[in-house]
Amino acid sequence: MLTLAAALLLSPVSMPIELAAIPAPLHGTLLTPDGQTRAAAVILPGSGPTDRDGNSPQFGIKAAPYRMLAEGLAEHGVATLRIDKRGINESAAAGGAEADLRFNAYVDDARAWAAEAAAKTGRPCAWLIGHSEGALVALAAVANGDDKVCGLVLLSGAGRPAGAVLREQLASLPEPLKSQADVALTELEAGRTVANPPPELAALFRPSVQPYLISWLALDPARLAAAYDGPILVGQGTTDLQVSIADAEAIKAAQPRATLVVWDGVNHVLKAAPVDRAANAATYMDPALPLAPGVAEAVADFVLKTR
């Protein structure tokens, strides 16, 4: 039996990391294995106020999937840098004004974090593990090549442009709001701002966020995947209420060299969950529920076999 001191020596080592950025530094957590670091990765968060652990306290989300994934990968010798994106948590001061934010800011940050993860772990490059919207960030980050990125792991990522996803989500709106939303999206997709969005749609189409939406709507994840010649793992759960198997298959169809892994009974926050919406959503609020079996193992296996 291990003594407490011995057990502590075998534990992964966690340390805060600060990355220089404008207008303020970015922050993250580096978790290194207790033994040899065999690979390094950066975990890129999903949309909204999602922090480095995968939580959104404002919405009661505390499933901590990124922290659990990092811990699972450390058991296999994979070091991870999980991050607070600009504007969120400890990186709040780096957010700047909403009207000045563009999707490419997250893309540039992902590249910088990859270089930092490689430098801190002594590896030649780092993997980008993008979850949800973070998968699109990862794909965009390698669009022009980056020798500090080993490859991509795309978890629960959309396979269609954001406009298609938003139209699907807005399909239940009553008329005339539905038609007005479609007109607004069409204008933004064309690179034009919308002067007077309906008050009922202000949360989505407020003027200050429209430049960001224009930069986001222009990206097609399938097209980006098709253009990338590095290794890609696409991981998708069958009980994901936000992203479908069809999205994962779209990425695979666009880039046949990608490896597709489907986890039965796994939801958007990478936990074992039923199809029932209420029970599924409850897993988002349960910090004690572990990561679904097989998720960390599949990611580690792919990363270590394709180094």
Image: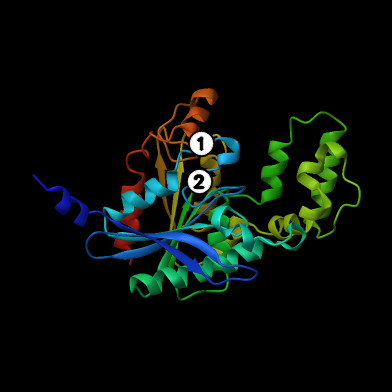
- Disc tally is 2
Q: Which comes sooner in the sequence, label 1 or label 2?
A: 2
Query: Which residue occupies the foreground of this view, 283 or 30?
Result: 30
Task: Quarter of the image for the C terminus: give it.
Answer: bottom left
Confirm whether residue 227 shows in the render. no
Q: Which residue is mark 1?
A: 240
Q: Which residue is mark 2?
A: 156
Confirm whether residue 35 shows in the render. yes
Residue at x 33% of width, y 74% of height: 122
Quarter of the image holding residue 246? top right
Query: Which residue occupies the foreground of this view, 167 or 33?
Result: 33
Which residue of the protein is positioned furthest toward the left in this rendering? 1
Residue 54, x across and y down, in percent: 49, 46
Residue at x 36% of width, y 64% of height: 40
Task: Quarter of the image for the N terminus: give it.
Answer: top left
Residue at x 65% of width, y 69% of height: 23
**Residue 133, above or below 111:** above
Q: Secondary structure at mark 1?
A: loop
**Residue 89, above or below 16:** above
**Residue 224, above or below 187:** below
Which residue of the protein is positioned furthest toward the right in this rendering? 196
Residue 126, x across and y down, in percent: 41, 67
Residue 292, x across and y down, in percent: 37, 38
**Residue 156, above or below 289:** below
59 sits left or right of 129 in the view? right
Q: Secondary structure at mark 2?
A: loop
Contact between labelled residues 2 and 1, with CB atoms less than 8 Å apart: yes
Q: How far apart are the alpha carbons under marks 1 and 2?
A: 8 Å
Q: Amino acid at mark 1?
A: Asp
Near mark 2 (Cα within 10 A), the count class, few <14, some 14-19 or many ≥20, is many
Query: Which residue occupies the foreground of this view, 153 or 203?
Result: 203
Q: Amino acid at mark 2?
A: Ser
